[in-house]
Amino acid sequence: MPSQMEQLKSDLLQLSSPEKAKNSAWFFKTGPGQYGEGDVFIGVTMPQQREVVKPYIKMPLSEAEQLLHSPEHEFRMCALLILVSQYKKANAFIKEMIYNLYIRNTKWINNWDLVDTSVEYIVGAWLEKHPDKMQILCSLAKSKSLWERRMAMIATFCYIKKGNASEALDIASILLHDKEDLIHKAVGWMLREVGKKCSVEAEEEFLRMYYHTMPRTMLRYAIEHFPENRRQAYLKGLI
């Protein structure tokens, strides 16, 4: 009898589409020298993945970890969906196991959608009351891995949603001059969320300190929802 992991893979393959796989490979930049270089897609949409994974939510963690080691992007995404779902319902012991599983497998969580779908719900959530929270997040933010740096930033969404901006602003300051566009977008996005969910004053205080030197994409994301005259003032350096 096939394992839950093998059955899930089979279910996904039955829905696979070469045309969708080709489109996903283009969208997630899998070409030589691009951020998703070498990633493999089978062509299953995210809504389809969320539906297929439902019967497998209680998959043993050992199988979920094995699934996360798959070359196929959709298999890795389903592993993360399972881990997030289990984490939300787990006791503290299992939550710690899932967090540790996540941290030791970051090399497999290697595209922005994989990070954004999972990191705040596992890493952000586990570290919320951890005494070494900022030490761990800062270590990720200083990593050589683009994806670990993005994890550090997006993990803070967990705290932003509860009205706490300090973690996000601290990580944003570390990533302010990162060379990667995907980090510029992540930082700008989280700054925008600070303004929406915590305090626009806190966001603007940060922007006034740094907007002259931060990457343009980061600034544009951060001020996207500002009134047009305010947005233009930042873009023209008039604040």
Image: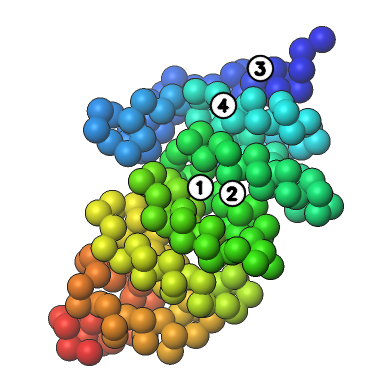
> Do we see residue 188 in this rendering?
no
x 36%, y 85%: residue: 204
Q: Picture coordinates of residue 4 (x, y %)?
A: 76, 22
Q: Picture coordinates of residue 224 (x, y %)?
A: 34, 72
Q: Which residue is labeled 1 in the image? A: 115
x 70%, y 44%: residue: 98
Q: Identity of the amino acid at label 2?
A: Ser
Q: Is mark 3 on a helix, strand or loop?
A: helix
Numbered tag placed on residue 5 in the rendering: none
Q: Is residue 190 above or below residue 139?
A: below
Q: Is mark 1 on a helix, strand or loop?
A: helix
Measured in 3D between alpha carbons, the distance from the residue under mark 4 to the one under mark 2, in whole angstroms, is 16 Å
Q: Picture coordinates of residue 93 (x, y %)?
A: 81, 49
Q: Quadrant of residue 170?
A: bottom left
Q: Identity of the amino acid at label 1?
A: Val
Q: What element carries label 4?
A: loop
Q: Which residue is labeled 4 in the image? A: 69
Q: In which quarter of the image is residue 50?
A: top right
Q: Which of marks 3 and 2 is in front?
A: 2
> Do we see residue 236 in this rendering?
yes
Q: Which residue is labeled 3 in the image? A: 10
Q: What element carries label 2?
A: helix
Measured in 3D between alpha carbons, the distance from the residue under mark 3 to the one under mark 1, in whole angstroms, is 24 Å
Crowding at label 4, few (<14), some or many (≥20) Cα neighbours within 10 Å? some
